[in-house]
Image (cartoon, helix red, strand yellow):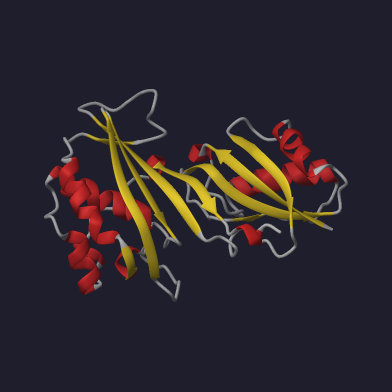
Amino acid sequence: MRRIRLILEYDGGAYAGWQRQTNAVSVQQKLEEALRRLTGEETLTVTGASRTDAGVHALGQNAHFDTSSRIPADKFSFALNTLLPEDIRVRQSSEVGERFHARFSASGKEYRYLFYSAPHSSALYRNLCAHVIYPLDTALMRAEAQSMLGRHDFAPFAASGSVVKDTVREIDFVSLYENPPFIEMRVHGNGFLYNMVRILAGTLSGVGSGKLAPGAIKRALKSGSRLELGVTAPPQGLTLMRVDYPEDALI
């Protein structure tokens, strides 16, 4: 058996997220169907680095699977892209050591959240960004984002009903870039809670629009209350950009 690593790009608009579900179509399902058809291995399963939610996109999702197929590792990407729908693409395939795990070997992830700040929504970019009708003060947003940096208990940023026990994470940077009408937020950390980035995006846009008083993140981290933060921003603005691994994890 060999372990193959995939780097994936997909438009999540048509899918109920990454993870296979019984009552909806997922990215994992489409990928496994293509791989089983390609290899003839009916029980083949794929493990992803991030369980992206419904409507969320990826430019650098990682996944792995085990196979006895003799297809050269670098050819899996070409073969799979002839079988996958056009909104899912394998950017790279390679063989890795048996200890590599797409999820548990990851040392960090970077996400992008894209706002479309204009009086009217976009026809062309409607599935790739979140429309914000009110002007956003990016200086206020940048100042607010600084409270995210470092190691904190981010329990207030966990989605309702989350059952994860350890809510401590470390955030390396939160950056905002302006290219009107777009405002791009980038955030990198050693891990993220479910909906954490979307709650951060909703909080920053709330502060930037004046709907939320500055200092919301600091207040939430101190009190542990989700009520201090903004709304959960829409999924279509979110893209998983990359997943980081230590070099020795790939051997």
Quarter of the figure with residue 2: bottom right
Q: Which corner quadrant holds the N terminus? A: bottom right
What residue do we see at 79% from left, 56% from top? 43
What residue do we see at 48% from left, 38% from top? 13
Provide residue 132's location: percent of width, then percent of height.
24, 36
The image shows residue 2, relative to residue 130, as above or below, that is below
The image shows residue 185, relative to residue 117, as above or below, that is below
Q: Which corner quadrant holds the C terminus? A: bottom right
In the rendered view, does 151 fall on the left or right side of 33? left
Question: In this figure, what is the number of numbered marks?
Answer: 0
Q: Can residue 50 be seen in this view?
A: yes
Q: Is residue 44 visible?
A: no
- In this view, the residue in front, 74 or 181, is 74
The image shows residue 150, relative to residue 142, as above or below, that is below
Provide residue 36's location: percent of width, then percent of height.
79, 46
- In this view, the residue in front, 70 or 28, is 70
In the rendered view, does 84 fall on the left or right side of 61? right
Q: What is the residue that sits farthest to the top in this orientation?
A: 123
What residue do we see at 45% from left, 72% from top? 164
